[in-house]
Amino acid sequence: MREPNCSEGSLTEDAEADARALQIACTLHEEPADIVFQRRRVSRQPRSSMEAAKTKQEAEPPTAASSEPTREASPPVMPRSTKLWPYSLSSRVGLVDTHCHLDFIFRKVGHRGTYARFRNEHRDTFPDCYEGCVANFCDPQTFKQRHMWDAILTEDGVWGAFGCHPHMAREYSEEIDEDLIRALEHPKVVALGEIGLDYSRRNKCDHGQQKRVFRRQVQIALNGRLPLIIHSRDSTSDTIGILKEMVPSDYPIHRHCFTADWTEAQRWLMEFPNLCLGLTPLVSFPNAGGLVEVARKIPLDRLLIETDSPYFLPKSESSRLKTSHPGMAIHVATWLASLRNIEVEDVMTAVRENTWRIYNI
């Protein structure tokens, strides 16, 4: 992490924030064992915009028998090799990264300016069709830092979501609860999350404590009629059980950063008919394993694209970039199209419709 360029008066506060961000980055994400990788408004006619895509591939119920045939070949090489591809891709459909962490990105690269400035500095890695992103604030200590996240959310093409990550469940308190509720009142907040359960070895929080914090935040989302962004690692049965107990079956849910196999994917899709699975650049990793099958079989109307940046930098960019960012969502779209042997435009049309349905953006 680069040394922050800040005034002497704010050095201590920023240094502490940088240290915390680094600690979070080291604990929130590890590559799972089974993973072997200015806003332009679009016409809000989602139903009609899907017609062209659905004539090629009608969305089927999420069962192995009814899904499109799985090709036996290994993940294909993308059709272009120039640095401009896929950023030069033109599309009539806007691309929205449905899950990123702008605060973590800025900390990682030492950026102290606006998101617009960040985009300008990295303009060669943002596609022309980029429309915006959902910035996720999952560190409960940032909920009270309104000066930070309000500055981000005031920018064009940035929407927000707040929720206490299960790795930090032990920090949840009455004060954090109040801070969260206040943050969710921001007019550009579109969801609550990421929240859930994480039973992986890196999370030292007690399972009972995680469940209590998860339940409380689900209730807050229900009170505010906010969509849910769900994090679940090694905890599928408990996470699904709590959701089935608390929310209507058709509640809008983004099952964030899905990394498991098709069997688990079907379980989520069948339990919650208005749930979408979020796929990240992990789908392009050489050892993506069962995730490739998910990418090929998931009905297009149950799919969201996300970067989860700054994590999961696409392998093709690792030699020239320090971190992933929302512009990298185009890599997910192009890989999905290649894996399914369909046009990128079909993927983007479907995903844009799904983003509207889940997030109303």
Image: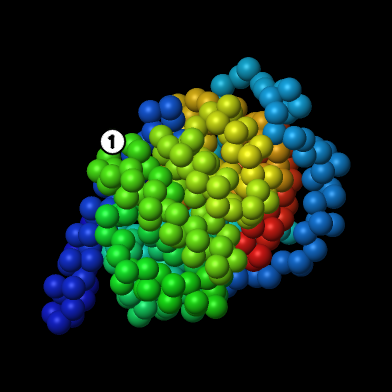
- The number of numbered badges drawn on the structure is 1
- Height in image: 74 above or below 321? above
Dot 1 falls on a residue whose secondary structure is: loop
* Nearest to the observer: residue 222 or residue 57: 222
Which of the 4 image quadrants contains residue 36? top left
Residue 46 in the image: x percent, y percent?
Answer: 77, 59
Identify which residue is drawn at 66% across, 21% down. Answer: 71
The foreground one among 120 and 358 is 358
| 72 vs 245: above or below | above
Report whether residue 207 is seen.
Answer: yes
Q: Quadrant of residue 62?
A: top right
Please, what is the three-letter code of the amino acid marked with disc 1?
Arg
Residue 328 in the image: x percent, y percent? 50, 51
- Please name the residue shown 70% across and 38% down the image: 299
Q: Is residue 128 visible?
A: no
Name the residue at 44% across, 72% down.
181
Give the residue at mark 1: 201
Q: 343 or 219: nearer the eye? A: 219
- 158 left or right, relative to 139: right
